[in-house]
Structure formats: C-alpha cells, structure tokens
Image (spheres, grey):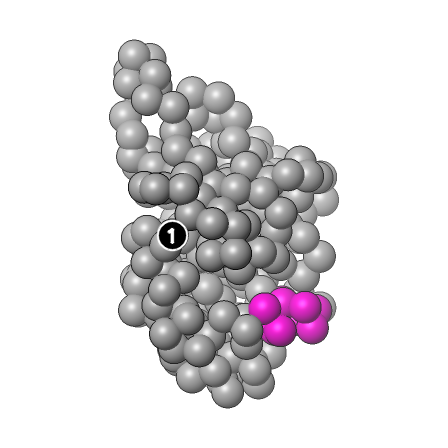
Amino acid sequence: MIIIVDYGMGNLRSVQKAFERIGRQAVVSDRPDDVAKAERLVLPGVGAFADAMTALRGRGLVEPIRDFCRAGRPFLGICLGLQILFDESEEGASVPAETGLGLVPGRVVRFARSLEQQGLKVPHMGWNVVEPVGDWPLFAGMPKEKVYFYFAHSYYASPKDQAAAAAMTEYGGRFASAIRVGNIHATQFHPEKSQAVGLAMLENFVTLT
C-alpha cells in the first residue's frame, strides 16, 4: 500500500491523482498506524519548514516517518517533503537542527538575493532542466539530458555529503534538485505537475525493490 502523508500542508489530491493516472492506488492518511504499515511512503508538502514540522509533531507523525525510513522501505519526499528531511533551515529565523527530521545531514538555504540582479526571480517557478547524478533509479528509462520538471520554491537543500545529490539543476548556480540516501528519495521539483516525465518517475518509484 502506498500512503501519502497528510499533515495539512500540500497538494495531496494532485499527488494522489498522479498515482491514479499510472494505475496505482495511493491512500491519503494522517494516521501514524497507516504510516507504520505502509509499503511505500510519500511525503509531499508546500509551505514553511517550521510549520511543517509543527504539523507533523501535532499529528504524532515524526517518529513513524523516521522509523519507516530507517526500516529500508521506499520513501519519496516532494518539495517541502524533501526539505524537512534535513537537519535545519534558514527559512525565517534560524530553525534549530532538532526541528527537522534529521534523516539527511545538511541544511536548507534560501536562493541568494543577488539572483535578481541576474534577471532570475525568487521563488524559482516553472520548468527547468534536471540532470541525474550517477545511476539514479527514479530516472530509469528517461533521457540523460534536457529533462524538464516543474519547480516552485524559494529554498533548496544543501546536503553535507554531496554524494546525497541524486540530481542537479542550474538556477544562478547549481543546486541539488533531488537527493537519495539509501531507500530515501526526494525531489525539490514536483513530479505530479511534470506531465509525462513526472508520471514516469512515479512509476519508477512504485517499482523500486
């Protein structure tokens, strides 16, 4: 069973519909028991890092998500669901390291304000090229160059170990647009909004062993 974690932040129905389009059933749930029993877990999200962690704590979901990931089952984070995997974020006031899930060492940082001098807007919104790093299984069957996915974000993840980067994107500099640490996969972009390539990525996630 695929569980999409509901913590009150994010376009849950869009993610669920994307799985339906590839013929896969996914259940939206905020129940810790459902997270614990899931075969595959998806953590989407749109909004602020600290608010997301507060919502997860309020629903008793933090430890079940950590336990799921540490058990080695396939996990997919999307957008904010990638960022809260990290230790801390500089969004707003500095968020203490313990506020994040702490599953991927590193922090979340804001795009430099100097990007506007380069004619680049923040938030980074719209389609951009995603380049896989190494043999990332979620990219199986896709072209290795010029694959576009849809983004909407002002902050991006900076992993402590650059080997955690599963894909890179250029926006006034290169940043990790996807990460992989063992069974944990996460994307800063939105597969559910990325048409055919996004659906192909979700299918690759479903078929991960």
Task: Please identify the quarter of the rendering in which residue 115 is found.
Answer: top left
Residue 125 visible in the displayed image: yes
* Residue 70 lies in the magenta-colored region: yes
Q: List x then y, in percent, for residue 70.
A: 68, 68
Q: Residues within 10 Å of mark 1 (few under 14, many from 20)?
A: many
Instruction: Give the answer, above or below, for where 190 lies relative to 207.
Output: above
| Amino acid tagged 1 | Phe
* Residue 203 lies in the magenta-colored region: no
Q: Nearer the viewer, residue 13 or 77?
A: 77
Instruction: Give the answer, above or below, for where 197 lies relative to 37.
Output: above
Task: Please identify the quarter of the rendering in which residue 128 is found.
Answer: top left
Say whether residue 127 is left or right of residue 204: left
Q: Nearer the viewer, residue 208 or 12?
A: 12
Question: Where does the magenta region start and end?
Answer: 66-74
In the rendered image, which quarter contains the N terminus? bottom right
In the rendered image, which quarter contains the C terminus? bottom right
Q: List x then y, in percent, for residue 98.
A: 52, 56
Residue 147 visible in the displayed image: no
Instruction: Name which residue lies at 42% across and 84% down.
Output: 31
User: Which residue position is annotated with label 1?
Assistant: 49
SS at badge 1: helix
Say whether residue 61 is left or right of residue 118: right
Instruction: Name which residue lies at 52% across and 31% down.
Output: 175
Instruction: Name which residue lies at 36% across and 54% down.
Output: 50
